[in-house]
Structure formats: C-alpha cells, structure tokens
Image: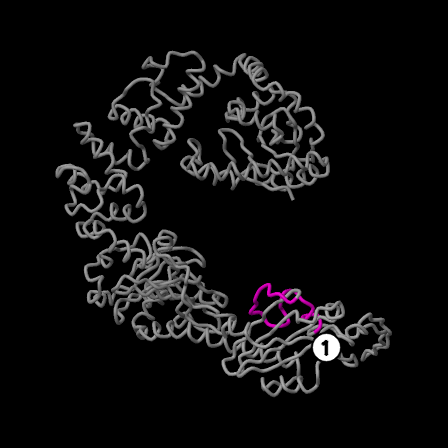
Amino acid sequence: MQKKELRAMERINATPEMVRMAKGNSKTMKYKYKYSCSCIEKKTKYDLMVRCRTCGDILMVCIFLPEKVAAGELTPSYEIYCDITGGGYITRILKDGKETRWSRAMIDNIDGMCLYHVLNGGYWYVGIENRIWQNPVEQKKIKQLLKSQAEGLRGLLEWQRDERKRRIREAEEREQATWDADMGLIPETLPGFRQWMLREAAGQYFMFYEYSRKTAAEGYCSHCRRMVPITGPKHNKEGICPKCKAKVTYKAAGKISSLATDEYYGQIIQKIKGGAVVRKYRQRQWYRDTDYITPKSYLYETERVLLMDDGTVKRYYYGLYKNKKRRFILDKDYRPTATLHREIPIKLYKKNLNSIKKTKFADSTIDLWDKLPCSVTAYLILEKKNPIIEKLVKIGMFRMAADVIEMPYSCGRYITDGETELIKALRIDKARFHRLKANGGGIKDLRWYQMEKQENTIWSDAMIKDFARENFSMTTFDFLPVKVSYAKIWNYLRKQAELSGNRYSTIVYRWVDYLNMAKKAKMDIRNEMIWKPKDLKAAHDGVVMLLQRGEMEKEAKKLEKKWPKVNGQLPKLQKFEYADKKYCIVAPKNICDIVKEGRILQHCVHTCDFYFDRIQKDESYLFFLRKTGKEDIPWYTLEVEPNGNIRQKRTTGDNQNKDFEDAVRFLKKWQKFFIKQLTDEEKALGVKADQARTAEYAKLRKDGNKVWHGRLAGQLLADVLEKDFMAAI
C-alpha cells in the first residue's frame, strides 16, 4: 500500500445521524454483573463510532470520537487501511481533519487511544452492552471481507492479530532458512569422539575399589578404563594411577550412589564444504543406579563456529529460539576479534586434525601444541592473521607464540609486523635469537635482549630470565639514587632473596619504600652503605623505628597546617563508636591518632594526602577496628563513607589477614547502627561520596594503576578496591 494512493481515496465523514447521536451521547446506565448486582452511572453511551468503505482490495475503516463529532469535527480521528489480498495494514492518524502521522500498530495499541480500553476492558464482560456504534451492515461487511469470526472492530482486531502472527512466522522462517543451510553443512559426530570425551576430556578421574577389611589390592581407573594394582586406598584420598599416570581420587564402590563429575567441555574440528567447523560439546558423568565400570552420561553440542574459506566466521549456539523451540541460533553479536581473548581454552580432539589440511588452515600448527593458549577458534583465526605465530611454533618457541596471542598490543611494541624474516621481526641478531630460544623466552625476555643489543653489552641469560619472570622493565630501577648496572642489581636481589626468602618483586617494593623513608629521615641515600644495605629488611625496619621516635607529633602538626579542617571534622564521628563483647569501633580524636595508627600498622593512611582531603570534603572518614579490652592496640584501619559503606580495611603492611573474616559479622551490625545515626544531610553526603568513588574507580581502571607492594602487588588497584568494598545494607 502506497501512502500517496491511500491519501487519494475518497474520504469518509460523520453522517447527520452520527452527529445527532454524538450530541445526545449522555445516558445513565445500569449494569448487571455475572456474579453480583451493581449499579454504575456512566456519562456516555458510546465511546467510539465506526464507518467503513472498500476501494478495490483496500478496506478503509474510520474511527470517530463522539466528543469531537459533537463539537463539530466531522472527519475521523483514525483511518485504518487493510489490504485484503496482500495482508498489510496501516493507520493514518488525524487531528482536526489534518494528517499528523502514520502507525503500523494494531488498533488496540494506536497512539495510546481508548481503543485498548474499549476492546480489552470490562466492556466485553457478560451483560454489558456494546460501547461502539457501527451500522450493522458495515459490521457484517468487515467480517465478510476479512473472513474473521467476530464482526466490526473486534473482527478487524482478530484479522490484524492473525496477520501479525503470519508476518512473524514468515520472517522467522526466512531467518532460519539461512541457518538451516549452514547447519546442513555439519557432518555427523565422529564415533571416536564420544569415547574420547568420556576418557580424555573429563578432567576428573576416579580409582574405584571394593572395600574390605583387608587392604584392597586392585582398583578400576576411570581414565584408562582397566583394573590396576593399588596400595593403601582411602575414600576421597588423591593419588596417581600406576598405569596411565592420571591424577585420580579414590572412591569406595559402596559410596558412589551420589557421585558425579562436574560438567566439562571438549572441541573437535571437522572439514565442511567451503571451510571448517569448530564444534563444542558439553558432557557429564554420574554413577547413580549403575556400576562404576559403566557410568551414565549425557553429551550434547553447545556451539558451532563456521570458519569459511572466504574469511567469514559465524558462531551458532544451541538455545531457545523466540521462546518457542530449541535449535542452533546465529550469534549476531559475535565479533571474533573482540571475543577471542575472553574464550577459555578447551581440550581438543586431535585424531582427525589431518582433515583440516584440505582447508585454508592447511599450514596450521594447532596439532603441535600439548595445550593451546586460547580457544581453538581463536588460535585458527589469529594464526592466519599473524603468520609469525606459525613460524614460532614450528621451531618450538611456544612461550613466545603464546605471548603473541595473549598480549597482542605489547607484542606490537617489540615485534615488527609484516616482517617475513623471524630474526628481523624480533629486532635482535642471530646470536641473541639462539639465546632467546634456548632460554625458552617470551615477549618479556625479548625486550631485555633488545635492550642488551641497544646497550651493546652482554648480560647473563639467567639475569634476563629472572627479570622477565618478575616483569621488570628498563625503568623499574629508576628509583635508585645512583646509576647502577643491571648485573649489580641482579646480584643484590639474589642475596636479599636468600636472606628474606621473598621474591625479587617484593624486595624491589621494599627497597623503594626504604629509600623513600631514608630520604625523609635526612639520610645520605647516595652513600652506597645507605642505598644498598647488607640486610634490606633489617634496614627497612630500622628506618621505620627511626622515623617513629618523636616524629609523630611533629608530623601531625605539619598535617594540621596542611589540612586545617580535619581536626574540626573528627569530633562528629564520636556518635558512630560502637562495641560488642568481642570487637569495637573507635573514632580518631585528632590527626595525631591517625599518624599513630599509620606508623604502627605500617600502612599509608597518614602519608597519603587523599585521605585527609576526603575527610575535609566529607567524602570518607577513618575509623579504627579494635578488639574489645584492647582498644589502645591498633588492629585494622577502616575508610568509611558518610553513608556507612566501607571502602577499605587494612592491617599491618596494608594487608587483610584471615583473622578479619571473623569480624565481618560485627562490621555488618555496626553498619546498621551507623545508618540509624545518619542525618538527612549526612545521607546526602553519602550519595555524593558514592558517585565520587565510582568515578575514581573508573579513572584508576582507565589509567591502569596497579598495587606496588604487599601480597596484592601487580594487581589492578581498581580491582583490589572494588573487592575490598563493603556496602552498608
């Protein structure tokens, strides 16, 4: 239907009879309901007036509103056009006889008008007369033309609903036709794959044995599927199968009625016309109502990814389509380059990998991996996109190949894209390339060999391996007050590791902290005996004690000058103090209390300006979690928002130990108490604090800020803070 043609049709206006009825549309009506009697007064007799006309295959139904007709508006408010043969419909909406817009909605959902109320409301209950006026002849005409069961507008609505269902059905059939064509390419599941899933993909294996007073001499391994000799089995004890060397859990045969494996996945690649398909299956095994030799299991396919020779990638997942039926559904939002690195590596069936040698993946090295660093789909696409992966795998440099896959942006900084010769692509010479390969190096090792080449020197391969393992970069040691060779730094870290038993990264963080404190203590940090003490940990602890002697009050006075409003803010926190038999919450009385807390617990609460800034701005406050009866002994420091949300909770060394878990229930009780003390003004401050925290976390994540010391070293600061957050309920 063309709108231009519809506009040219002869218009239908209200008849004199309709005008007369519209003006006399007021009437008191009594209604008798089916289950009770009641009398309801209505102000109008008719809610709608309807006329219709045909023009060829087009049925035009016009709806008039009585109140507008009574006011002199003879034109309809809605003109509904129905294509009797083609099945389409459209509504023209008018105001004062002028077109305002068009709608393809059904008549009970047009423009929020009263049609829905009239057609679906209580007017159709038994015993209530019709509220729509229409000539009986025209009512039957609509029924006849549209072949509906009902007459008039209800017949029109019935026809529209049927047409809508038909259009939806046809659209779904068209959509599924292409899917079915793709699914028609999928071959049968290989018989050997089912057995492989049972034996190799499970990940959980058991050693079943028959219990007896004497020690069982043999057991049945669920991995190698045979009886093997065992010694000293114990139910739920872990061990190793003496035949296949699989890790197993011992299970007494009489105690397996509820035993089942977790769900596990496996993948298989198969050749199809025009490409290959990667299929993912899910399986589970259980032993209820069966013996341990023949467990029950289910196996069904969850995903199919079609990798076509023309570069097209389509992912189908098995799910509920339109809430109507289960089938493989095309993932329209699937973007391989955006989802590759979120896919989990899954065990791959390798016995048929020769089949893909006849596809565009003929040169793939996927069969050379014991365990892929990513999903099968990810590997095949990335390997094709970046040929250096294939070259690295073929010469056994699996770690470097894995880094190229897992760290594409970092690799772009150290590997020349598009370079055909591998040594040139890695930007090192032949000798260093052989050292890198012998060292089993990855991208982190490569950047040190590149630096070695730039410096025109030779470093120990062991040093490079250690520095790469700890993810040290060329700027990691810029904190040192004098220029020191990397070899000298490495030797020093090795000695400190022997003394303390800590990792190199932990030693570096301690070294940075020590030099910062030594500088604050006015020590000559350029003196080698100062910047490179024989025992770094002992020197670190010593300078901490040095700074604590008589310095707390001095530091507090400096902070009071810098943050003059903080001491004025702290007294109002006294009302939030709380205690039970085991724990208590203490509020700091002044800045000196905060300094003392930070020094004793050796964290940064007194050295970071943002804590004092937040207190001044009423964004967050500091409270001390103590043990009842030991209120004077610092235990945990809490950062709390004005609404009771706990942002951070830290003890000695900026850590959170297992002993804190027992105090969580107390803190939740305190948060409830905290909320009860809040004024409306403090609640408003809490809302602002919540917004500020959210914005801060977003910025930290965007900037990639990480924790520099402690057990959380190397983790994203935003992740650590969000995990530490404890919302007030």
Quadrant position of residue 78: bottom right
Q: Is residue 107 magenta?
A: yes
Q: How many marks?
A: 1
Residue drawn at x 24%, y 26% is 487
Based on the displayed image, in which of its 4 quarters is residue 490 positioned? top left
Front-most of 558 and 631? 558
Identify the residue at image location x=31%, y=45%: 407
**What residue sits 63% from the left and 21% below the top?**
565
Residue 64 in the image: x percent, y percent? 69, 72
Amino acid type for the residue under numbered disc 1 = Ile
Can residue 218 be seen here? The reply is no
Does residue 702 lie above or below 540 as drawn?
A: below
One can see residue 540 in this view? yes
In magenta segment, residue 146: no
Residue at the farthest left position: 430
Q: How is the image coloured?
A: one colour
Choose top left, top right, bottom left or bottom right for residue 163. Answer: bottom right
Above or below 261: residue 648: above
In magenta, the rendered stretch is 97-118
> How many residues crowd around disc 1 within 10 Å: few (fewer than 14), some, or many (20 or more)?
some
Given residues 657 and 128, the one toward you in this image is: 128
Numbered disc 1: secondary structure: strand
Viewed as shown, does residue 553 lie left or right of 678? left
- Judging depth in this view, the residue of 95 and 637 nearest the camera is 95
Quadrant where the C terminus is found in the figure: top right
Image side of residue 418 versus residue 115, left or right: left
Relative image position of residue 507 (x, y in whole percent): 37, 28
- How far from the left and from the top, in percent, is residue 543? 44, 17
Give above or below for 356 relative to 9.
above
Residue 217 picture location, percent across and down? 36, 63
Residue beneath disc 1:
132
